[in-house]
Amino acid sequence: MGVILIAVIVLVVLAAVMVLATALRRNSERAVGDLKGETLRNDRRQRKAKQGQSVPAGRMVEQSAEIERVSKEVVPASKAEVATFTPPDPETIGVTRRQFLNRSAVTLTAFSAATFGAASMVAFLWPTGSSGFGSKINMGKVADLESAIDGGGGFLYKPEARAWLVRFPSAALQKARSVYSPPELVGMEAGLLALYQKCPHLGCRVPDCGTSQWFECPCHGSQYNQVGEKKAGPAPRGMDRFAMEISGGNFVVNTGAIVEGPPIGTNTTGQEAEGPHCIGSAEE
C-alpha cells in the first residue's frame, strides 16, 4: 500500500510540473514562426511570373517587418535623477508576511487533504485478509486438538487466537448449562473450551501451572481452575472466553466475540489444585 501511495504522489507532482512547463513555453513563444510549404510555393510562382522584376522572398519580407517592429519598440533610456530611498512601511511588510503564511498554510492543508484522500481510497480498495485475531479462526479437528491438549499436560496455547484451549469434562455439562451461554456451550458440549489469555483483573497474560493444573496470574496472584473459573486472588470474575462453533468436525473460535467469565463462586467441575502452586495466591 505504501508503494501505491508514493506512486500516486509522484504522479500528482509530475502533472503539476508539466502544467507549469506548458505555461512557461506559451509565454516565451515568439510571434514569428516558420512559413508553410504552400506559402513558399506561391511565393516562388509569383517570382517566376515577374521574371524581370526584383521581388523579395516572403521570408525576407517577414524578417524586415520583424526588424522594423523590434527597432520601434526599443526606446533610448533617458537620464533621470536617482530617486531617494524610502523605507517600506512595516505594517505593509507585516501584511505581506501574513498573506504568505496564510497562503502556505492553505496550500499545505489542501495538499495534505489530497494525499490523505488518495491514501484512504487506496486503503479502501486494498484487499483485506479475513484471518487473525478479531475474526473466526479454525483451530483444526476436535480429535486432533484433544490429543494436542493431552500431550501438553492439559493445556494448549494458540497464539493466533490469543487463547488457551482446554478440555471440558462431560460430567460437568449439567451444571455448565445453568451457568454458561449457548455460544460457550457449543464448544463445551464438544469437549473443548477456548479461554482468553488476559486476566480479568488488569489484563496480564495468564500462564498455566503444570503442577497445580490451574491458571495462575503472575501479576497479582489471581488463580483459576482448568476451565477458567476463579479460585483465588483479586480478579472480579473467572477468565473470559470466546464464542465457539463446530463446523465439519472442526473447532472454530470467534475471537471477535469475547464472553465475560463466570461470576465468583462458579465451580462446575469441582477441580481443586492437584499439586503445588506456581505462584502464591493473593487474598480476595
Image (cartoon, rainbow, N blue to C red):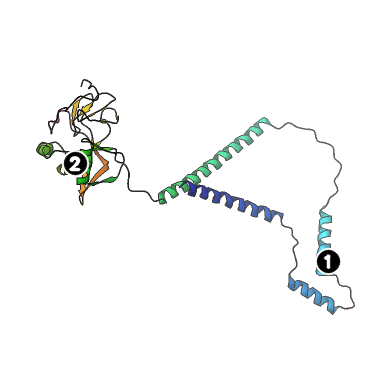
Q: Quadrant of residue 276?
A: top left
What SS does tag 2 mark?
strand
Residue receiving disc 1: 60
Q: Earlier in the sequence, mark 2 or mark 1?
A: 1
Q: Nearer the viewer, residue 112 or 152?
A: 152
Q: How far is disc 2 from disc 1 in space, using C-alphas? A: 101 Å
The answer to whether one can see residue 74 in this image is: yes
Q: Quadrant of residue 232?
A: top left
* Residue at the (62%, 35%) spot, across then down: 97
Residue 77 point in image, percent of width and height: 85, 46
Tell me residue 182's x, y (percent): 16, 42
* Kind of element beneath mark 1: helix
Q: Residue drawn 65% across and 31% down?
A: 91
- Residue drawn at x 55%, y 51% is 11
**How packed is label 1: few (under 14 Cα within 10 Å), some, or many (20 or more)?**
few
Q: Residue furthest top?
A: 283
Amino acid type at mark 1: Met
Residue projecting furthest to the front? 151
Q: Identify the disc placed on residue 247.
A: none
Q: Position of residue 40 (x, y in %)?
A: 77, 72
Q: Which residue is mark 2?
A: 192
